[in-house]
Amino acid sequence: MSVMKIHKGDQVMVISGKESGKAGKVLRVDKEKRRVVIERLNMAKRHTRPNPKKNPQGGVIEREAPIHASNVMLVCPACGQSTRVGYRFTDDGTKVRVCRRASCGKDIDRV
Ligand SMILES: [Zn+2]
């Protein structure tokens, strides 16, 4: 199992499927299934029973459905473009993600 390149809180761009071309913030990451939930993207209707605490009416609610991590690309916070992710190690051995765009190459994670 390889490491997830997408982390919670990242901005990502969807590159395939019905939400292709849209960008949003990652709310949750499922490492086992390699899926990510992106804010307000891939909305799916869910039929729910009435729940006295959360949803007394029941009925249909819309929620974000997970998208496979292979269908999204990270948006680099430095250059603002979707990019593949590389890694480097800082002097103290911390692993940080870097933008693989040749014109950028900046750190994605704050050191
Ligand atoms: Zn960049």
Image (cartoon, rainbow, N blue to C red):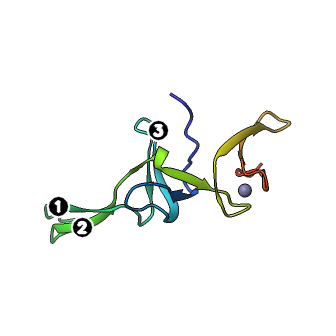
Rendered residue at 41%/63% (across/down): 41
Label pair 3/1, CB-CB below 8 angstroms: no
The outermost residue toward the right is 91
Amino acid type, callout 1:
Thr
Amino acid type, callout 2:
Ile
Q: Measured along the vertical axis of the image, is residue 41 above or below residue 6?
A: below
| Alpha carbon distance from label 2 to label 3 | 26 Å
Left or right: where 11 falls relative to 102: left
Classify mark 1: residues with Cα within 10 Å, few (<14), some (14-19) or many (20+).
Answer: few
Rendered residue at 79%/33% (across/down): 93
Q: Measured along the vertical axis of the image, is residue 93 above or below residue 80?
A: above
> In terms of secondary structure, where does tag 2 sit?
strand
Residue 9: where, in percent of width, then height? 56, 56
| Alpha carbon distance from label 3 to label 1 | 27 Å
Question: Which residue matches tag 2?
Answer: 61
Which of marks 3 and 2 precedes in the sequence?
3
Rendered residue at 72%/47% (across/down): 100
Left or right: where 32 falls relative to 78: left
> In terms of secondary structure, where does tag 1 sit?
strand
Q: Is residue 95 visible?
A: no
Mark 3 Cβ inside 8 Å of ligand 1: no
Nearest to the observer: residue 111 or residue 80? 80
Which of marks 2 and 1 precedes in the sequence?
1
Question: Which residue matches tag 1?
Answer: 48
Tell me where residue 20 sits by quadrant: bottom left
Classify mark 3: residues with Cα within 10 Å, few (<14), some (14-19) or many (20+).
Answer: some
Amino acid type, callout 3:
Lys
